[in-house]
Amino acid sequence: EAQVTQNPRYLITVTGKKLTVTCSQNMNHEYMSWYRQDPGLGLRQIYYSMNVEVTDKGDVPEGYKVSRKEKRNFPLILESPSPNQTSLYFCASSSAGGIHEQYFGPGTRLTVT
Amino acid sequence: AQKVTQAQTEISVVEKEDVTLDCVYETRDTTYYLFWYKQPPSGELVFLIRRNSFDEQNEISGRYSWNFQKSTSSFNFTITASQVVDSAVYFCALSESYNNNDMRFGAGTRLTVKP
């Protein structure tokens, strides 16, 4: 089954404690992306990757890091989480960037206290 | 940069009513792509439709239809004979051909269909 998986699905952490949210896709897609969803703001892109070792900033990259060492994986790293990073996070993949539909993971709800 | 506006924050209808969700976009590109996604209460994002800027034909899929009008920069979504299962947040999104890695989403419209 074609899918994008994210882990964990729910996470409560404290300010400053480094965390990683994993994302993996099994569709051999070159393009992957991270979004955060906040009430009234829709989805905003954090980072995207066009291929292995190729990443770039989206609209709201501050406070986040990513890596793309393998085609299937695109982890999101918060080195020092802050309460304003409390949000719902989605990973997505696509065969051709924003030209084609993106397949989204189930979401990770992060709370930073 | 491109922009997507969904002016309706929340809409509430009674089952079997027709409802239209508005989407207005801004772009300087002549080639672009428009999308609608559905987010049901369970939280996942479900792809509904993709349209490119050269295809202005309206589309119908069952009870769903989409009206793309370049003259007014709108890509509206109509649900005919709404059902409770249509209750969800609906997002309109846009990506431009010259920078198709940057997909912009609207703020979303929360649709509630009451029995």
Image (cartoon, rainbow, N blue to C red):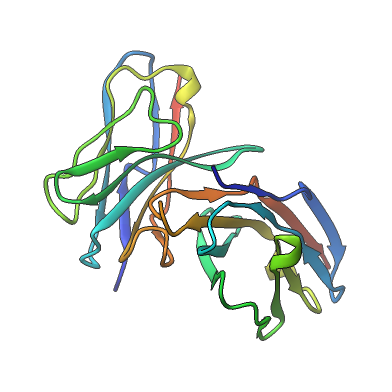
Q: Measured from the top left, where is residue B28 in percent x and y?
A: 57, 52
Q: Measured from the top left, where is residue B90 in percent x and y?
A: 65, 58
Image position of B34 with respect to B106: above or below: below
**Is B37 placed left or right of A98 in the picture?**
right
Residue lying at 31% horizontally and 55% vertically, measured from the top left? A5
Q: Is residue B83 visible?
A: no
Image position of B30 with respect to A24: above or below: below
Residue lying at 50% horizontally and 64% vertically, measured from the top left? B31
Residue lying at 12% horizontally and 51% vertically, measured from the top left? A70
Image position of A29 with respect to A89: above or below: below
Residue A92 or residue B7, whichever sits in front: B7
The answer to which image quadrant residue A3 occupies is bottom left
The answer to which image quadrant residue A35 occupies is top left
Residue A54 or residue A11, whichever sits in front: A54
Q: Is residue B113 visible?
A: yes
The answer to which image quadrant residue B37 occupies is bottom right
Please tell me how many numbered marks the rendered image carries: 0
Residue lying at 80% horizontally and 66% vertically, measured from the top left? B20
Q: Measured from the top left, where is residue A4 in percent x and y?
A: 32, 59
Q: Give the quadrant of the N terminus of chain A.
A: bottom left
Residue A40 or residue B92, whichever sits in front: B92
Q: Measured from the top left, where is residue B66 in percent x and y?
A: 69, 74
Determine the residue located farthest toward the top in the rendered image. Answer: A16
**Is A83 placed left or right of B64 in the picture?**
left
**Is B80 placed left or right of A89 in the picture?**
right
